[in-house]
Image: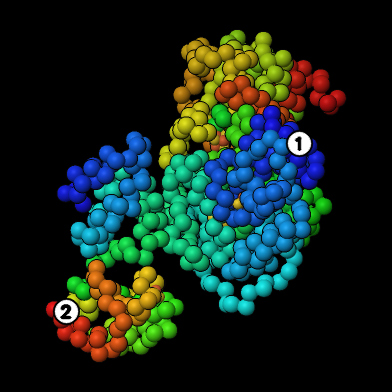
Amino acid sequence: MPVIFINGEAVDTGEHRTVLQAALANGFYVPHFCWHPELSVVGNCRVCLVEQEGRGVNIACNMPVVDGMRIETDSETVRAQRKAMLQFILLNHPVDCGICDKAGECALQDYHYAYNGEPALSREPKQKGTKFYPLSSRILLDNERCILCSRCVRFTREVSKSNVLGIEYRGDSALVRPAEDRTLDDDPYSDNVIDICPVGALLSRSFLHQARVWYLEPTPSVCPRCARGCNVQLWHRKPEWRLKGLDPAQNTRILRVTPLENPRVNGPWICNRGRDLGEVLERPRAEQALQKGAGVTMMEAIEATRALMAESTRSIALVSSWASNEELRAFRNALGDNFTSFVKPDRLPEEGEVVEDELLIRADKNPNTRGAQALFGSDPPEIPEDADLILVWGEGVDFGRLPRGAKTVFLGSWLLPEVGHADVFIPLSIQTERRGHYTNFEGVVSAFESCQPRPEGVIDAETLFPLLAAPGAWGRG
Amino acid sequence: MKHLIPEFERMKRRLPPGHDATLLLPCLRRIQEDRGYIAGDDIDGLVAYLGVPRIQVEEVLSFYGMLRREPIGRWHLQVCHNVSCSMRGAERLLDHLSGRLGIQPGETTPDRRFTLSTVECLGSCGTAPVVMVNEAYHENLDAADLDALLERLD
Ligand code: SF4
Ligand code: SF4
Ligand code: FES
Ligand code: FES
């Protein structure tokens, strides 16, 4: 392995082929806009300047590692030239950080404070550009803020392969634009460009002006919308920034979803469905236990279920593929002997949705089919005509097609019609209200944490199952 | 553009395999030479023939000022207004042409005879000011020369 010297320190460059990678991996920060670990090297922003002894200043992102080379990342020359580069990059930039969603997590802002800090030297009027140019129904482009690093363009060419974006015209008239007959709506991974844009040029329409990022914090979670189980971060207000004056729901709402890098699952990307988790999770909740459609207490609903279990001679359970590994184990341990269990898909592909592709999206639109099948087998649900009790855990079951004579117990979280049709309905917590794990289609287990309070009247499945098996536990637990 | 494909095929044979996209610029030039401008169906044809994404063709078309997406007049008058030509009176020539033809740079006369444009250095600074008429250079011009020139253009 080549050894190079960075700021006088010997560094084993390992697998890294460029000076920038070797420096970053060894704790020497070198600023960079256009370089991204998952994209090709273009070397157009010129901010990653370093000095090589005997050869002068050049860009680190495109500088091959050569055994014994001596690199300075912060010499006086580097500092001066980096500063000059930042002057160029800001030449036509409107510096409208005050109204920019990226403020607080913007590389340009950070580098300006760290490496430049001076007002513009240019006296020329700034070139005007389009603000709020609609790239799609999801994304707006602010051409004045764009520094033309081409990360977004390379993403659509090299990662999502939609080939939608390009840079048209040249010099200070250059503009990021979609092809004339396309929009970014053609790209099911488009929102990743918002994350990788080093500045505030690409804006999420759903997050536009919703919150200052420094009032928010992320909770690690897992996207439940397909069997990939992409690791994500759910962004919500920090507890110390919850405001009494705000609608309580706003204080805990998920304001945006971003990828949580996991090389074994999703790398640094997620699809747009994952960004729209709210579509599923924020559907109106069922928060009241019911017996034949009439409100009862949780205790009464549990008793009623136990009575149905005691009477039944042929009990079938349709197990949720949205349940966590912990919940699935709790079910098997507490009730495994009482039911013949089958795993069912809670959700199927929706109209217009990408069913499956080569990057991330899987046809199985459930996060834990593999975890559930590991405990309950992979036979498709088969309900004998003489079944007299059917426990339906999670959505996706048409009650009209269950045997007429059978009693039904429904465990669910959202206000679906089945809630009123079941003999007993017990409302369960959702993923954001408890912690747990899902096993994705390749067997990789990912953890999710809770970030929202469990509504009153709703129970965790892990608490419920032991109670169904032994009601004496109620009150003690 | 279809009738040019045999020509494109000959160019292709000079390239190592897998580098068809390299032909984008020569193909665009050839199409413009042939038809006078590059039309929407030329772009579609190239996308299919070279297997490049449409956005890449649009990038090249918008980058190079000399590639046109619209037809122009029979005579294309390109006035150089870079430093040397400017110092030797290019702006006066431009105003003169504008006045005589009744059009601004970038426009075409209603009878579609003339299109007037400005260009950057034509590499002929020693004989500035220079006006390019279609493929021919006219050098060391003044207003009278221009008038004489216009007389010769039908
Ligand atoms: S929009 Fe953002 S990512 Fe795209 S080129 Fe501009 S600065 Fe780079
Ligand atoms: S690929 Fe699947 S798991 Fe990943 S974000 Fe999209 S829907 Fe969610
Ligand atoms: S990061 Fe090296 S030139 Fe942009
Ligand atoms: S400036 Fe006109 S030819 Fe060079």
Q: Is mark 1 within 8 Å of ligand 3?
A: no
Please give the residue where the numbered disc 1 appears in the rendered image. A11
Q: Secondary structure at mark 1?
A: strand
Residue positioned most to the right: A476
> How far apart, in angstroms, are the residues tagged by discs 1 and 2?
71 Å
Residue positioned most to the front: B126
Residues tagged by mark 1 and mark 2 found on one chain of the structure: no
Q: Position of residue A231 (x, y in %)?
A: 64, 35
Q: Is residue A140 above or below residue B89?
A: above
| Residue at 63% across, 50% down | A59
The numbered mark at residue B153 is 2
The numbered mark at residue A250 is none
Chain letter of disc 2 in the image: B
Q: Position of residue A456 (x, y in %)?
A: 74, 40
Chain letter of disc 1 in the image: A
| Residue at 73% across, 43% down | A70
Q: Amino acid at mark 2?
A: Leu
- Residue A221 in view in this figure: no
Q: Quadrant of residue A309?
A: top right
* Side of A350 relative to A218 (left or right): left
Residue positioned most to the left: B154
Q: Secondary structure at mark 2?
A: loop
Q: Amino acid at mark 1?
A: Val
